Amino acid sequence: MFDFDKIINREYTASVKYDLRQQYFGKAGVLPMWVADMDFETPEFIRNAVIERARHPIYGYSIRTDAYYQSIVDWLDRRWHWKTEKEWILYSPGIVPAINFAVQAFTEPGDGVIVQPPVYFPFFNAIKNNYRKQVLNPLIRKDGRYYFDFDGLEEKAKEARLLLLSSPHNPVGRCWQKEDLEQLAGICIRNDVLILSDEIHGDLILPGFKHTPTASISEEIAEHTITCIAPSKTFNLAGLATSSVIISNKELRESFANALERIHITNGNIFGTVASMAGYHHGDVWLDELMQYIRDNFEFLKESLEKFETLDVAPLEATYLAWIDFRKTGLKDKEIKDKLIHEAGLGLSHGPLFGTGGEGFQRMNLAAPLSVIEEAVERLGKVF
Ligand SMILES: Cc1ncc(COP(=O)(O)O)c(C=O)c1O
């Protein structure tokens, strides 16, 4: 049993979530439930591996060893039943940089890139900042659940070269099923659109659901897919800047590797390498317990909101991010935001940031001790 109830003070640790509250919300005391990292401690087997390496007094240029790549291959086989090869795996300090490198490597300025909002907002920036054309294919919301718009995609794919996929989907919490992904990939392939499958949340699957890596569905799909994975969300290691891009198609892999080498993204972070290996070697039981805890936090939130009658939450299948619908309150987005910050003292992620379909919604981070979720729900109850 791991202790997910423990409260750990993160203030003044140079934490984005805690130490940027004044700057971001205009109020330093809000209960921070925005940035997607966890308030749980990184498991001891990872901390010990980092401490062990830190004891060696030299932190010079380092390599990623064969054992490092093997730990990723083994994890993906064990957890996702996806057979990969070490040679397919490239390093990136983060997934957002990887998305930008992919946009640069596989498209030209002015090319169309598809996004399916509401979605993790750096997707939009990767398109805009690289002078590509944003092609929106919003998700369809039906009875509170979200679906791909395949008819829309048939049309949009004609004017695009790349699709940015969030699988599982941040912020709506869908764990896309094999059939969904297969149909989506079929449309992309027929229209010569590459798929960037951002699977950073692929380990964070609630009990009863199963993550399907897009590239694992068929060889043909793998040939058109660039997959992004990381131990950062899984084991709370975002500060260690270590993630992977997996590309089985040799030609695409070489293009991507060239984009990295051009700007010398090769060294990496010795502590990230060590932590990643420790997580992938020893993290199974901890991760399973974590996801049961997240499921319980979500159930508590959902049952509480049902009593309020003004707030609804989308079903959570994956991620630790709850997508809360405030539209029944009849309030405008700015009013919701102001009430959350100044009356409830809560720092959530503002729905409209996630693009079309985000209006009237807020995203709440559930990766915190239950007592924190209880406090947040009580405050929501008083104000809404
Ligand atoms: C879908 C998605 N992709 C990427 C990231 C962040 O990637 P990184 O911190 O590795 O750049 C997040 C973080 O919330 C995310 O939700």
Image (cartoon, rainbow, N blue to C red):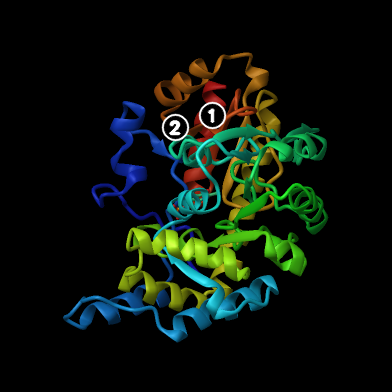
Label drawn at residue 380 = 1
Where on the picture, by quarter, is residue 92?
bottom left
- The percent position of residue 68, horizontal first and vertical second, equals 45, 80
* Viewer-closest of 379 and 56: 56
Determine which of the numbered discs, if any, sits on residue 202 in the image: none
The extreme bottom residue here reads 67
| 63 relative to 239, above or below | below
Q: Image point 54% across, 19% down: which residue?
A: 333
Image coords of residue 158 (percent x, y): 73, 38
In the depicted structure, whether residue 65 falls above or below residue 323: below
Farthest residue in the left direction? 57
Secondary element under disc 2, as helix, strand or loop, is strand
Describe residue 304's horizontal placement relative to residue 376 as left or right. right
Q: In this view, does 374 lie to the left or right of 115?
A: left
The amino acid pointed to by label 1 is Leu
Q: Which of marks 2 and 1 is nearer the N terminus?
A: 2
Q: In the shown orientation, is residue 227 left or right of residue 376?
A: right
Residue appearing at x 80%, y 33% in the figure: 142
Q: Badge 2 is on which residue? A: 346
Where on the picture, by quarter, is residue 380? Answer: top right
- How many angstroms separate mark 2 from mark 1 (CA)? 8 Å
Task: Check disc 1: other Cα within 10 Å, few if <14, some if 14-19, many if 20+.
Answer: many
In-front residue for pair 132/181: 132
**378 or 314, which is in the foreground?**
314
Find residue 74 and report its image quarter: bottom right
Check if mark 2's residue and mark 1's residue have beta carbons within 8 Å: yes
